[in-house]
Image (cartoon, rainbow, N blue to C red):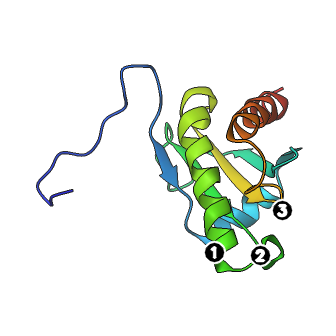
């Protein structure tokens, strides 16, 4: 992307752009919020307060895999898969003003079929938003 290029816009499908969670404090707040376990990952979700520094209509997503998932290669592969399902599912089914964290599971995140991970994320989002 060139420095003078305009910022990316949301596709016409009604999807939202995702912002990345990068601060440890955001991950810690999400860890205390609602959880929805799935076979391939754990979803943590929280609705942000109006006084937080993030844009109120943004959907923010974070990804984490501990060393239990495996070596660096295995962790990076698991996070790539989590980023892709987030791009496909959370951008359509997530709610603006929410933070989501996807936590990889040992031997499952990288091994399960991709379609199952997408289905599990849709179910987990519905559970969290009940």
Disc 3 is placed on an element classified as: loop
Find residue 29 and report its image quarter: bottom right
Q: Is residue 45 above or below residue 128?
A: below
The mark nearer the N terminus, 1 or 3, is: 1
Q: Which residue is mark 1?
A: 73
Mark 2 and mark 3 residues within 8 Å of each other at the beta carbon? yes
Give the class, few, some or many, for how many residues have Cα within 10 Å of label 2's Cα (few <14, many ≥20). Answer: some
Q: Is residue 89 left or right of residue 5?
A: right
Mark 1 and mark 2 residues within 8 Å of each other at the beta carbon? yes
The mark nearer the N terminus, 2 or 3, is: 2
Which of the image's four quarters has the C terminus? Answer: top right
Q: Residue drawn at (86%, 47%), measured in percent from left and top? A: 35
Q: Position of residue 129 (x, y in %)?
A: 78, 30
Q: Which residue is mark 3?
A: 107
Residue 70 is labelled as: 2
Q: Is residue 13 above or below residue 48?
A: above
Give the class, few, some or many, for how many residues have Cα within 10 Å of label 3's Cα (few <14, many ≥20). Answer: some
Find residue 21 and report its image quarter: bottom right
Q: Residue drawn at (15%, 60%), measured in percent from left and top? A: 3
Q: Residue drawn at (49%, 36%), measured in percent from left and top? A: 57
């Amino acid at each position: 992307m060139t420095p003078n290029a305009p910022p990316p816009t949301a596709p016409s499908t009604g999807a939202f752009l995702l912002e990345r969670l990068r601060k440890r404090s955001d991950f810690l707040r999400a860890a205390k919020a609602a959880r929805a376990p799935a076979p391939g990952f754990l979803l943590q979700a929280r609705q942000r307060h109006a006084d937080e520094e993030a844009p109120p209509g943004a959907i923010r997503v974070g990804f984490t895999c501990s060393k239990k998932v495996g070596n660096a290669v295995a962790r990076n592969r698991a996070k790539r898969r989590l980023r892709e399902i987030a791009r496909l599912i959370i951008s359509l089914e997530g709610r603006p003003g929410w933070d989501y964290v996807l936590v990889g599971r040992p031997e499952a995140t990288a091994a399960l079929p991709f379609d199952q991970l997408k289905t599990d994320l849709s179910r987990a989002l519905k559970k969290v938003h009940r």
